[in-house]
Amino acid sequence: MKRSNLKKSIFLFILCVFGLQTLAQPRVERVEPPFWWVGMNEPALQLMVYGENIANAKVMFDYEHIDLVGVKKTDNPNYWFINLFVSPNAEPGTYKLIFQQDGQSLEYDYEFKERRPGSKERNGFDASDVIYLLMPDRFANGDPSNDNMPGMLEKADRSNPDGRHGGDLAGIEQNLPYLKDLGATALWINPMLESNMPDYSYHGYAITDFYKLDPRYGSNVDYVKFVEDCHKEDIKVIMDMVFNHCASEHWWMKDMPAEDWIHHYPDFVQTNFRTGTVIDPHASEYDRKKTTDGWFVKTMPDLNQDNEFLATYLIQNSIWWIEYANLDGIRMDTYPYADKEFMAEWMKRINYEYPNFNVVGESWVEPVGMVAWWQEGSNVKNRYYSNLRTLFDFPMYYTLGRAFNEENGWSEGIARLYETLSQDFLYYDPNSLVIFADNHDTDRFFSKIGEDKDDYKIAMAFLMTTRGIPLIYYGTEIGMTGFEHEGHGMIREDFPGGWPEDTISAFTGGDRTGLQNDMHAYLQNLMNWRKSNEVVQHGKLTHFIPEDGTYVYFRHNEQGCVMVILNNSDEDQNLDTVKYQECMKDYDSGREIIRGNKIKDLDEIMVPAKAAMIIELSKE
């Protein structure tokens, strides 16, 4: 070939290649939320569109009742943020987003679904419920075929306390009869969204995709069916969500939507874990910012909710899951670590869309005032309105851990319960608090009290009868043990019998030990009794100063009265009830719930040593 022809061929080849690149068709790799609904209270919707150089394309969307009101870009040309206005008159159906670039066009089908009947009026969890907390990887493995899935980095290994063990949605669903029979009315399940990390991923708090269930648990469709099946058993579902951070292997970490999407990126600056700085009037800005902007660990980058696009993304993601899965509640992880103004706006949006829904926030601090500060309408005077009704009662958690590990005194032992409850004036609504003795991050309660069965029973009687929403951590009903300092794997052991190869199953009474059956039967009795007792669920609490290691309180309303006696001493107590007449004067007999016996004379009540009595008062 002549040199001139060779040059001409090379020129035409280069022109063709660059011409094809210039005229390349727009490509869309992701649109989130993946679909939406007509008839939402909030008409605004923002779509995050991801694709190579997609921000160079023109966006067209022209439909009656759904308007394109604007498109916005960031410093990354691979993202478009498309703002739509969905009129109340919009109809469900599939609508086309059109992307045009250099004479090429792409049509992307986007679906608006019809809402479920009654979706707006859904009722969240409240003090009528008993919540059962479980870790999906450690509860039951109903489908061993999904233990190791294509593309998932970490494989199942039950020999590793910190590895994946294979529990899944199918395992929980297969044991719904057990949970219902126990008396649970709501399930809080630790995060189940995709956590495709190389190791230590079983806990679920390092999320790699906010719109996708981890395939080792099941699919999105499986999750929706699971919620439906729970509802058939009158069990509510509370989804665990995380706004403070994502995983280092999240899909967007390879091509972030904006430079300020992650705090301090690419550097690692660890949080100081001092959430009190967020509300401390004397805190330095340095300490406060390190709390909220620092990372938990290197594998959990801290999300910047000050970025308006990320803030909208997170709000819409939570609403999407509520609507899509028909949820009854949300548990929000690490509540004070996220931007507090954003969290207030998020709760405002949730309450606007679902007025009867409920969210419980995790504010892990011991002082009562530092939890009360976060509750809407807080009696702790501050200029911040959180819109959050429910928090975990960490002050009572610490109190329970101490009350049964020390001698009874003026303010020690059983008196600690009284002292902590006496500070309820700081809360706007103490009956909305979630009360618990342990959870997935703490020592197992049975271990904390030295595996004392009597102390266990008194504490469980208290949890089921005091104000608030009681929570039971999986395995507490059979006295599972473990200390947090020995490793999280020790406090998150597999529930016995949840795996096909297990030789002993705690799901059935025949395989449980005598002690396990005793503890299980005791708690089961209390939980099922509480389910139908509105006085205990919502009645006023009146308590009396503890004496001789014995604490007495009443739950009462116009419909009835329940008397609770907690004898934490080593001696039987012959209780003279004269001092309690302001609550008992209208009653002359009662039925003792724990033992099932009738009490005909209320003038004196014999209370066994180290025992609880719960008496439904009645009139002859």
Image (cartoon, helix red, strand yellow):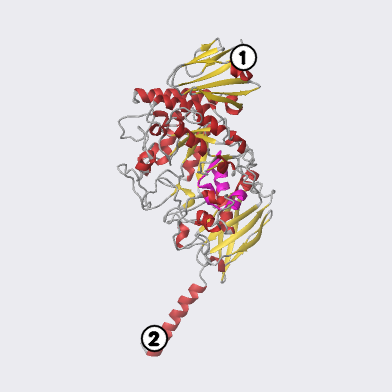
180 vs 219, nearest the viewer: 180
Q: Position of residue 174 (x, y in %)?
A: 42, 33
> Could you tell me residue 421's position as x and y percent?
56, 32
* Residue 35 seen anywhere in this rendered image of the structure: no
Q: Which residue is mark 2?
A: 6
Q: Amino acid at mark 1?
A: Tyr
Q: Residue at x 41, y 83 (%)?
A: 10
Q: Nearer the viewer, mark 2 or mark 1?
A: 1
Quarter of the image with the N terminus in it: bottom left
Residue hosting label 1: 587
> Residue 56: horizontal and vertical position, in percent?
56, 69
User: In the figure, 527 relative to 396: above or below?
Assistant: above
Amino acid marked by disc 2: Leu
Task: Magenta stretch: give its range.
Answer: 318-345
User: Left or right: where does residue 10 sit relative to residue 341?
Assistant: left
Residue 94 shows in the view: yes
Q: Which image quadrant: the C terminus?
A: top right
Q: Is residue 349 left or right of residue 442?
A: right
The residue nearer to you, when weighing 460 against 59, is 460
Query: Vertically, is 348 above or below 426?
Result: below
Neighbour tally class for label 2: few under 14, some 14-19, many 20 plus, Cα within 10 Å: few
Question: In which image quadrant can residue 7 be found?
Answer: bottom left
Q: Residue at x 39, y 30 (%)?
A: 479
Main SS of the magenta segment? helix
Image quadrant where residue 270 sits: bottom left
